[in-house]
Amino acid sequence: MINKQSITMEEFNKMLPETFSIETALACDLKCPECALGGDSVLRKKGFMSFEHFKIIADRIRPHAKYLYLHLWGEPMLNKDIISMTQYASEFCKTNISTNGIALTPEKAEELITSGVADIIVSIDGVTQEVYEKYRKGGNVKKAMSSLEILHHFNMKHGNKVHINPQFVVFKHNQHEMESFRKYCKSLGLHATFKAPYIRTNEAQFSYSDHPELQRKYYPDIGSLRLAIRECPNPQNVFTILLDGSVIICCHDFNKATCFGNIFEMDVLDIWNNPEYRKFRWNILTGNAPEFCLNNCLSYFLEQRRTHSRQQRIPAKDIKTKTEITEAKINLCCGPIKLDGFINVDVSPNADMVLDLERELLPFPGESVAAVVCMSAINYFSRQRAIEIIKDVFRVLKQGGIARFGTQDLRILADKYLNNNCEFYFQKLKDGRERFPGKTIADKFNEFFYGFQAGGKHCKYVYDFESLKVLFEEAGFSLVEEKKYGESRMPEIDKIDNRPEQMFFLEAIKNGSLVHDFNNDVNKTLQKIKSSIQQNPTGRPRNDIDIFRNLGFDFWEAGKIEKAWQYLLKVLELKPDDRITVVKCGEILHSLDRYDDLTNLYTAYLNCIPDDLEINKLLTETHNKSKIMKRDTNEMSRIRLELDKYNTRKNSILPDRGHLDACIKWLRVAQDVNCGGGVSAMYHLDSRRWDVDYPETTGYIIPTFLCYYKLTGIELYLTWAI
């Protein structure tokens, strides 16, 4: 169990489903009032899962499942195929069946014991018919106890391999029979277990027992409830599948309010890493459980419970907006470059949020994101898909939010092609490989249109600034600007931009017309002030400068630093010796560690007022801090040079045959390591572990081994291929 107080995104990404629940039956031969099914709270169509459908599910969960519950709501022994299902699943994981025993015959009991099942729960909530039938409506206690005895008999006959768990759900009305039940189980050689009930409403006819350990805990407020729900195992490693294949968050969702995908249509990990599912699970584990959990969970709930007899379906769009995203910044299509302080989104499983933009758009609520950056990725989509993505970026951005996109520049690439620029197109990487694939400049040029395979995708469209600007304007952005490398309104720009020799950078602001209006107003006011100064024979500016200065100070206090900065700079442009403004601008530059600009600011002022001792002192301090920063920068450069030495090739370059033999050896190891019939998806150097198998890769492995056998004559590879 991970401590939810310190869960990290790295820990979250390592969580994989291991425990599965499959609803093999949505029908029951009893009418237990506090059961969702017996109490008529389940609104879904009743029925049974076919063996054919079960096999499809079982084959999909096979690489992941360690433990499988063959029940959810309903009595699994009513399904005519339950024994076949148990046998099939028990081949690859431990299995569990919970039954009331009413439908169990001696023949079926023996088949179940020999099916390979690991655990059987038999629910008997009393030892007398009068007490038993108060909750187990329509049941017969003698029949239930007989089924338990028959299961125990056949288990002993076949080697006592199955763990049989007689379970007693304890209410106030049956607590006096606990001891009798314990003695009865002991007489059979079994150990009785006692369980707290789920009580759905305050109006329920049943109540908790007098035993505190058999009462479910209440929490006094939403905050403590959310903290408690962090311990829930379902978002960590549990995968719950309904009769129709829908995947939900847990067993408490009996009306499919939280459907995250369908196992008949998607693989396990595709559903598990579905952005909506990841967000839902992440919110639970980080103490921000969604409304569904707060209203419907029966393991954790408020002291003053909301009464509800039936769940209502929560639309997926509402689930997405249950938790607010505060000042989120998105690094779209991040690849291996993850930015601190950003939600890093990519098709790669190592991203903070796994999302394939070819199939899905952003799962964030409208106007919830402060900034979106996307470097060298929009060219991997068709133009039509690109406009859909950019429109969605516009949707999620807040008013005034920034989108910064960098992509390969058609003008640069075409110019270097037309000028036969071999220095550019035939660049080498540090390991000696060609930077751009292809034998000729034309081949390399075409890679930018159709090549550069990455994650199963390739380039599809090359833009220049004007062509990409059209898409942003079509999406609704009113201010779209081309920016130089490292030039931005975003303070993190130094860690965002890359490859200026081949890319252009576009920055767009949602409702950027406000910025235009602001600049126009500033310029108009500036002209007015200049005109008033020229008309003033004394040369003294009128009070308009004071207005500018006061506006700058007001914006600064309100946290609008950029607006404040622009106003204050206009004051200094008109009156460079305005000491109040110089001091305030100095505070701003100092907070940003921009010591070179700070030096220029103080120097310009001292050129007008050279005898200002305080500003002279500030200038001296600034010089000293600038030297320290440069020294630190030089030290960082030295450290980087030291680190770069580790990238220097130390082994000799092997011939092609040596590389081929090493690759084949790796392929063989990667195929065998998980015994799943395919090559492991990847090897994690940091944790020294192999990832899951991709069985479909056998289609590539077989011809590869056959070709290697044909080349080398090593018959072992022929055997492996066959």
Image: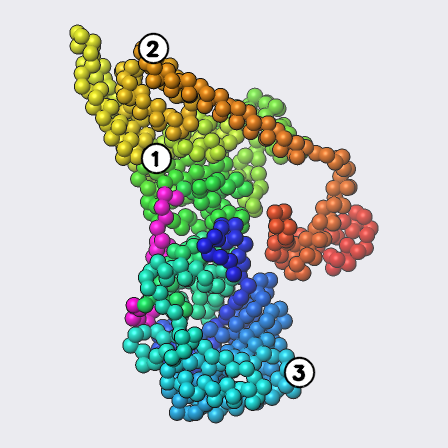
Left or right of 126, for residue 529: left
Vertical order, 57 against 473 (above or below) = below
- On the image, the x and y values in percent for residue 572 come to 29, 18
Q: Residue at x 66, y 35 (%)?
A: 646
- On the image, the x and y values in percent for residue 425 come to 60, 27
The residue where tag 3 is placed is: 159
**Of pointers 1 and 2, the one earlier in the residue sequence:** 1
Left or right of 454, for residue 225: left
Q: Residue at x 48, y 42 (%)?
A: 333
The residue where tag 1 is placed is: 509
Q: Residue at x 52, y 79 (%)?
A: 121
Give the distance between the C-alpha atoms of the residues marked 1 and 2, in whole angstroms.
Answer: 42 Å
- In the rendered image, residue 324 lying in the magenta stretch gets the answer yes
Give the distance between the C-alpha atoms of the residues marked 2 and 3, in whole angstroms.
Answer: 99 Å
Q: Residues within 10 Å of mark 2 (few under 14, many from 20)?
A: few
**Of pointers 2 and 3, the one earlier in the residue sequence:** 3
